[in-house]
Structures are given as structure tokens and as C-alpha cells.
Image: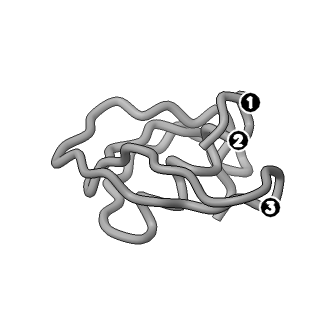
Amino acid sequence: MVMLNPEIIKCSDQYEIEEGCLSLEGVRKTKRYRSIKVRYQNETMQIRLKTFTGWTAQIIQHEMRSTIATGY
């Protein structure tokens, strides 16, 4: 899936988890949401809205934080 300019516009059910990262040494506690709604552009620049839950939501949040250099 291609996500250009992703923006989380809605989130719910916050929890705390320990995560590791290939860019940083060790594991750290961080807060995530079990459900997120994301607005993004696809590979043809069409705006899309999609809700993600569970592991997929966690991965998207992690990668979005990585791209804006705010850590986990």
C-alpha cells in the first residue's frame, strides 16, 4: 500500500506498549491507538480515507513517527 502525505484524523482506544526500532537501539514504551482513521493520497494522488485497527494501526503509527523524526 502506498500512503503519501498520511494524516491521522481520528483515533481511539489508547494503550501503552513497548516497541523496538531498527533506527534506535533498545526497546521503549510508547502510546498507540488501537483504531486510527487516516487520510492519505495513493499512488495516483487520489485522496483516500481508511480505518485501520490492531497491528496494522500500530505499524502505521510507528512509521509515521519515524518519518517525522519524533522517535517511536
Residue at left offset 38%, top offset 58%: 17
Outermost residue, left direction? 13
Q: Earlier in the sequence, mark 2 or mark 3?
A: 3
State the SS at label 2: helix
Residue that mark 3 sits on: 22
Residue 54's place in the image compared with 48, above or below, is below
Residue 16 is left or right of residue 56, and the answer is: left
Q: x, y percentage for residue 72?
A: 60, 43
Do labels 1 and 2 touch, CB within 8 Å? yes
Q: Amino acid at mark 1?
A: Ala
Residue 42 is left or right of residue 55, and the answer is: right
Which numbered marker is on residue 69?
A: 1
Q: Amino acid at mark 2?
A: Ser
Q: x, y percentage for residue 38?
A: 42, 42
Residue at left offset 55%, top offset 51%: 28
- Mark 2 neighbour class, 10 Å CA radius: few under 14, some 14 to 19, many 20 or more: some
Residue that mark 2 sits on: 66
State the SS at label 3: loop
Q: x, y percentage for residue 70?
A: 66, 28
Residue 1 is left or right of residue 31, and the answer is: right
> How many angstroms separate mark 1 from mark 2 (CA)?
5 Å
